[in-house]
Amino acid sequence: MLHFLDERGLRVASVDCPIRRPLYDERELENRIAAIKSAMQLAFQLKCGVLSVRIGPIPKQDAGLSYDVLREVLNTLARYGNRVGTILAVTPSGGDPEALLDVLQQVTEGPIGVNFDPAVYAMHGIDSLHALRTLHTFVSQFRVRDGVRDVEDQGVEVPVGRGEVEWDALLPMLDDTSFEGWMCVERTAGDDRIGDCGRAIEFLKRVMLR
């Protein structure tokens, strides 16, 4: 695969590891940890060194066991990532960014990052500028998506530039953080996803040149 990509001037930005349950759900937890570790090895072999994973909504600290389990699992994976050369990048679920920051600051066994997704925050009615300002020191990858909150108070993904993400302010803020990771354009809904991705790239170029 690496040879195939190299011939075309391409690189792998990151590997994503989908899991069925939150990382603090103790049902089959050891199997999920083993799967994530295996994916971290794959990310290193693909020479990207970043593995993104959703950990689920952050439990409250006073929730007791769930919070403690999450903290322990993240430290276990960070320690393993430090050994194999892969950073675990947490993809937010749209909750309070301060709650995610609190958890990340308690990971001391190795590096950990955030796969920042402004659309998730927009779809949950949270200011993505505030979220980036809160989490900027941990952002290792940036997911280019957009979203809105509809009349039924539900989150809907829309083409980049047509949602509630304030790109004119968000991109300069990202630049000010000395971000050096990948900006990964994605479209997970709609009838013309490839076309929407192409238009998103052109939109980003226009915003960056202003």
Image (cartoon, grey):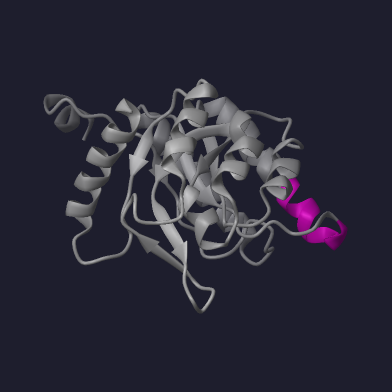
Image position, residue 24 (x, y; %): 69, 58
Q: Is residue 193 above or below residue 10?
A: below
Where residue 23 sits: x, y (%)? 63, 56
Name the residue: 73% across, 49% down.
Answer: 99
Pick the quarter of the image with the N terminus. Answer: top left
What span is in magenta?
62-72
Q: Main secondary structure of the magenta part?
A: helix
Question: In the figure, is residue 163 to the left or right of 104?
Answer: left
Task: Indicate the position of residue 64 as horizontal and vertical percent values.
Answer: 86, 59
What is the quadrant of residue 189 in the picture?
Answer: bottom left
Seen at 58% across and 39% down, the residue is 132
Q: Furthest-left residue in view? A: 7
User: Residue at coordinates 69% horizontally, 63% vertically from top-left?
Assistant: 26
Q: Point out the residue furthest to the front here.
A: 210
Up-down: is 127 above or below 109? Answer: below
Q: Does the magenta stretch include residue 70?
A: yes
Relative image position of residue 177 (x, y in whole percent): 55, 24
Question: Count the marks: how many?
Answer: 0
The correct choice, above or below, for 57 with respect to 81 in the image is below
Tell whether 14 sits left or right of 194.
right
Quadrant of the snapshot with the C terminus:
top left
Per the image, is 125 magenta?
A: no
Residue nearest the observer in this picture, 130 or 113: 130
Question: In the image shown, does 185 or 208 lie closer to the viewer?
Answer: 208
Residue 112 in view here: no
Q: Residue at x 74, y 35 (%)?
A: 105
Whether residue 109 is visible: yes
